[in-house]
Amino acid sequence: MLTLVQSDDQHTKAGDDVLIHVRYLSSGAVMTIDRLPSQLTAQEWRDLLLTDAADYYQTFAGARGFFRLPRPVYDSLLANVTPMAAE
């Protein structure tokens, strides 16, 4: 479950979204994905994003999609990935 972390920046603007571009192979597997944490595979990162932040995903033509995450949501996702690496 996603736990939100408050941003240290009190002046965060609504436009301070984090964009994550996903490109797929014809098989549906992830070809590339932005901001990939080093401890995850591209598919694991996409699956985590879809599990915890599916509301921020938009599908586009050409086998691609975008996550447009508010900065606090993105920061929380990264904070939750770090403990996964220790397991």
Image (spheres, rainbow, N blue to C red):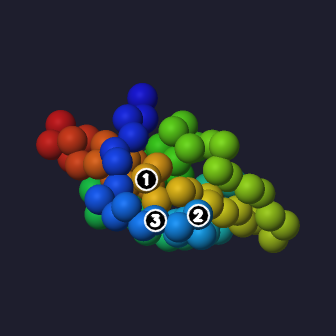
Q: Secondary structure at mark 3?
A: loop
Measured in 3D between alpha carbons, the distance from the residue under mark 1 to the one under mark 2, in whole angstroms, is 11 Å
- Mark before the other along the chain sequence, 1 or 2: 2
Amino acid type at circle 2 is Ala
Amino acid type at circle 1 is Pro
Residue at 63 percent of width and 43 percent of height: 54
Residue at 53 percent of width and 67 percent of height: 13
Q: Secondary structure at mark 2?
A: loop
Q: Which residue is mark 2?
A: 14
Q: Are marks 1 and 3 in contact (CB under 8 Å)?
A: yes
Q: Secondary structure at mark 1?
A: helix
Residue 78 appears in view: yes
Q: Which residue is mark 1?
A: 72
> Is the residue marked by circle 3 packed among few (<14), some (14-19), or many (20+) residues within 10 Å?
few
Left or right of 42, for residue 81: left
Instruction: State the residue in front, 9 or 42.
Output: 9
**How far from the left and from the top, in percent, is residue 34?**
50, 70
Image quadrant holding the C terminus, namely top left
Looking at the rendered structure, which numbered label has been put on residue 12? 3
